[in-house]
Image (spheres, rainbow, N blue to C red):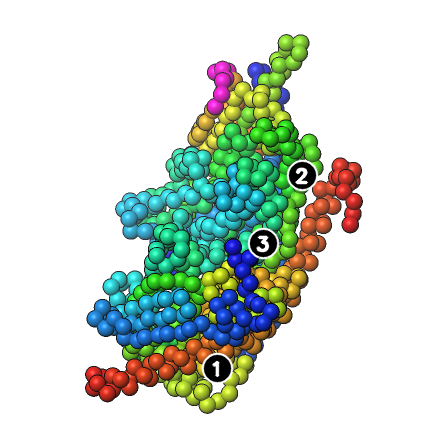
Amino acid sequence: MASRLEIFSPEGLRIDGRRWNEVRHFRCAINTHPVSSDGSAIIEQGNTKVICNVIGPVEPTLRSRVVPDRVSISVKVVIAPFSTIDRRKRSQNDSRMQEMCSSIQHVFEDAVIAHLFPRSQIDVNLYVVAQDGGVMQACINATTLALIDAGVPMYDYVCACTAGMLDREVLLDLNRIEESDMPFLTMATIGSKRKVALLQLEMKVQFDRLEPMMAASMSGCHHIRDLMDNEVRKHGKSRLERGSL
Amino acid sequence: MTVLGPAQRSPATATTAFLYRVDGSASWTVGTAHIIVSVSGPMEVNKRDELPDIATLEIVVRPDVGVASTREQFLQDRIRRVVGPVIALELHPRTLIQIVVQIVQSGDTKTLNTIALSASINATYMALLDAGVPVRSTVSATSIVCYGTSSIQGGLTTGVLIDPTRPELEKIEKDITSVHTIAYELKGGQIERLLLSESVGTFTEDEVFECYDTAAKVCEETNGTMREAVTKSVQQKGGWRD
Amino acid sequence: MPRDLTPSTIENTFVLKALTERIRLDSRSFNQLRDLDISFSSTEYGVVDVKLGRTRVIARISAEITQPYADRPYDGLFIIATEISPMAAPTFEAGRKSEDELVISRIVEKSIRRSGALDTESLCIISGEKCWAVRADVHFLDHDGGLMDAACIAVSAGLLHFRRPDITIEGVGSRREVIVHPITERVPVPLAVLHVPVCVTFSFFDVRRASSAISGRTRNDEAKDVDDDDVEEEDDSSVAVLVDATLQEELLRHGYMSVTANTNREICQIQKGGDMPVDVGVLLSCSEAAIMVAEKVTKLINKRLKEDGARRNVGNLLVEARAENDR
């Protein structure tokens, strides 16, 4: 189906009207579920929507999860059956999902200042409500915001973004149709420097094309960092005004 | 050879102590069959598998192709019955002795299940020796395949294959009359007791007894092969002494 | 089931201290692979034994005829099974998938299957009815680090070495029949391998973290250091990049990245888990280094294949049995 669509027009416009280096409409909210969790956030990137709830740091529920010198983080991702067109039930044990959970877990184990909470645990629950490409990046971004809301100290923002390569054109922040049509990578950066926490590429791509893809996704990550930072500051300001801190 | 006709045999080779992360390892090659066995232990045992008076013996058989099925379950059961009584399990109570049998090439045809079994038993025993697990006596096993080809003149030519290769088996597959997997316990290089006799097919009493006699000779030879391999590995291990 | 061994603090500081002086415990240089040995079974096609230092993996390729999936009638099946038995190390439990195992199986899957190393369309016999199902079983015999690299090399070499029996289709329409010619009757057919992916794992060590551990500073000081980072410029020298880590190095490393590359200068797969953050430039140079390693390994695979072919071709019989011209 996708091959009949024009992914990138000669005028330089993509299927949803963006230019190559534009991220999708980005909306985020923080402290969305104040009753059910310690920290929560909603992220919308285009039509992908993810809710994140963070519980912790709390005392571990299981003895096996006690790490003597640092906090242990566990990540669970639930994909709603109505999140895509084909309503198929996904099992939790799908190896793709398990891999995603463990990747996100490792990202935040090194982003959170873990030694401040020895012998405790943080549970991250992610709910993918709608998916239109870039589920992984949305999950990472949502987790960052929710952890900030929970007051967990981190070294810096962790931001993720995808970039694809269509023939010789780099495209930033792919949607579902674009994702299925070209090799793409997901990158997560920490802070506003060139530090990469996570990098995943799943399809074959020429080595020479790798550098522009990485550069594009990095700039996307930094852009998203600014957007998230604005939201966090706005939220902080409004809470200060309400005097609820 | 009175009843069954002349026998052919393919030679076996053994090597031990080539894996580093386990306590003992052995590889056994006979004909086209290749088996690698590792032994770990005595080591910490899972609480629910712990036995108060003897060591727990765990045997895992992994197939060359595909996932473990009833065939591997069968092999595992037979290996346990042959090797289990020989290991001095009571010397290490509340521990685990773990045996992993990896079939690299089974050497059997699709319908048969004998070469893999006899080779696994031999390899397992060698690995136990390498791991230094206390055993009471020596074990060796062999496979004997009897076949009868009827010629056009109506005469019946019978023959015996000992530890045959896969091409040999495929050639006579339609004419196989019986298959025997036999394991003996040896002491001082001499046959002591019969440990396993797994016979499939049609055969007479005379035939099976002849198979036992043939197997006894083969097992004594096999024992020699094992002895050589063990001597070699001990020499290598103890090389620093000289 | 014994627990996974955790390296002691002394071991940790010793290895890291050595790395700050650019020394590895096995005296290799940072970008040097361990001794790689590839050998093929003399009796069967598609059985490969790969030794990477003390790590040892056997891959076995097999093929049988089955029905293709209904939604992909023109594609054959290709499955890679990577289950780790306690033979590799007693810490692996039989029948239970650990997280390491999951990562290994996903990386091998992405490196070889998803990168299209095997042309699955060539496995089709009668569309929608019959196709070849190629199966790669990877047996991990010994674990001294780099399991995925060894597994990937083994499967790649196995696919190149494997021969499936020749087939002919007789009859027309619905009464078509597939005749399989045994290897003894007709020269078996090699698989359509489009490229040879080679996976290389790079281990990252934060040398600064090492020096603070050595000088006995607490982790709180480290946290302060990170704040200072914002002022000072990034330097690549703070990260040590090691190719083909041993188990000890794997247990101690702060982060890793596996890259799968081939000789066409293509990157098939990158997986940098979320551990230690690393500068982009380092990641790029790692990818380039992976291509160099892939070239070296592919050369070795081809050399071994040639030797094996010469050994099989005693009396030059195979040449006469073939109608194909050299291209």
Report the amino acid beneath label 3.
Gly
Q: Would you call the spot at circle 2 few (<14 residues within 10 Å), some (14-19), or many (20 or more)?
A: some
Image position of B67 with respect to B207: above or below: below
Report the residue at 55% width, 57% height from top. Answer: A4
> Circle 3: is it few (<14), some (14-19), or many (20+) Cα within 10 Å?
some
Q: SS class of the residue under badge 2?
A: loop
Local secondary structure at mark 3: loop
Quarter of the image containing the C terminus of chain A?
A: bottom left
Cα separation, mark 3 vs mark 2, equals: 22 Å
Task: Write down the residue under mark 1.
Answer: A193
Per the image, the residue denoted by label 2 is C188
Which residue is painted at 57% across and 39% down in the image? C127
What is the chain identity of the residue bearing mark 1? A
Give the camera-side residue of B124 and B238. Answer: B124
In percent of width and height, residue C186 lies at 69, 34
Chain letter of mark 3 equals C
Q: Chain of mark 2?
A: C
